[in-house]
């Protein structure tokens, strides 16, 4: 009779330990902050699950992070320049780090109606223009900036990433 009591007690202990392990895993799943979404140069749709802030830095050690309180700030308002970014959610505890890469995109648009050229990429461009006398000038065109042109004097515009 004593052996049956021990085996019954052992079964109860195994079941109790299994329930404890599953409970701890469930609590961790529901309380550890996570980040979902993506980042590109112009928009970001990052969302924090189980957290109230995000740390963003360009190195994985988070030596000089930018802290964003997700309750007070809209993530879609942030524009990221090309590079590698590390994102860590923060809540009661810190979550796992995710890595995002934003690739460089060069884009030059010529609007002949307005007589302007515009940088439509996400990096600054060195713009040179050639006229009848060869290369006549160089300007640095920052992101989303327009530069007036004179169509009658200039024949060719060349742009390269800065």
Image: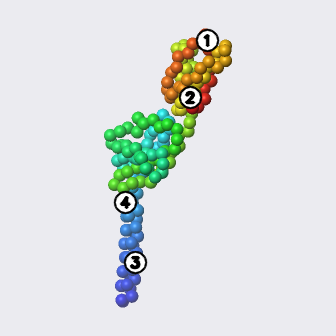
Picture quarter containing residue 111?
top right
Identify the residue at horizontal 33%, vertical 42% (top origin). Answer: 71
Asked if labels 3 and 2 touch by Cβ distance under 8 angstroms, the answer is no
The reply to whether residue 119 is visible in this rendering is no
Q: Which residue is mark 3?
A: 11
Q: Nearer the viewer, mark 3 or mark 1?
A: 1
Identify the residue at horizontal 44%, vertical 50% (top origin). Answer: 62
Q: CA distance from mark 2 to mark 3?
A: 71 Å
> Which callout, 2 or 4, points at the residue further toward the start of the chain?
4
Q: Residues within 10 Å of mark 3 (few under 14, many from 20)?
A: few
Q: Residues within 10 Å of mark 2 (few under 14, many from 20)?
A: many
Q: CA distance from mark 1 to mark 2?
A: 21 Å
Horizontal side of 142 relative to 54 (left or right) equals right
Q: CA distance from mark 2 to mark 4?
A: 50 Å
Identify the residue at horizontal 52%, vertical 20% (top origin). Answer: 147
Looking at the image, which residue sits at the far bottom? 1
Q: Which residue is mark 4?
A: 27
Horizontal side of 76 relative to 146 (left or right) equals left
Q: CA distance from mark 3 to mark 1?
A: 91 Å
Q: Which residue is mark 2?
A: 125
Q: CA distance from mark 3 to mark 4?
A: 24 Å
Q: Residues within 10 Å of mark 4 (few under 14, many from 20)?
A: few
> Which callout, 3 or 1, points at the residue further toward the start of the chain?
3
Q: Nearer the viewer, mark 2 or mark 4?
A: 2
Q: Which residue is mark 1?
A: 153
> Which callout, 1 or 2, points at the residue further toward the start of the chain?
2
For numbered disc 2, what is the local secondary structure?
strand
The front one of 141 and 16 is 141
């Amino acid at each position: 009779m004593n052996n049956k009591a021990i085996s019954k007690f052992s079964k109860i202990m195994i079941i109790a330990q299994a329930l404890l392990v599953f409970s701890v895993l469930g609590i961790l799943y529901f309380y550890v902050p996570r980040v979902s979404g993506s980042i590109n140069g112009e928009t970001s749709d990052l969302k924090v699950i189980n957290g109230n802030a995000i740390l963003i830095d360009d190195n994985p050690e988070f030596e000089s992070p930018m802290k964003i309180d997700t309750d007070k700030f809209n993530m879609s308002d942030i524009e990221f320049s090309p590079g590698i970014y590390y994102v860590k959610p923060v809540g009661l505890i810190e979550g796992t780090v995710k890595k995002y890469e934003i690739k460089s995109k060069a884009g030059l648009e010529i609007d002949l109606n307005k007589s302007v050229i515009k940088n439509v990429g996400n990096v600054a461009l060195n713009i040179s223009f050639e006229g009848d006398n060869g290369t006549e000038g160089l300007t640095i065109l920052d992101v989303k900036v327009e530069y007036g042109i004179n169509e009658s004097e200039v024949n060719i515009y060349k742009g390269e990433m800065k």
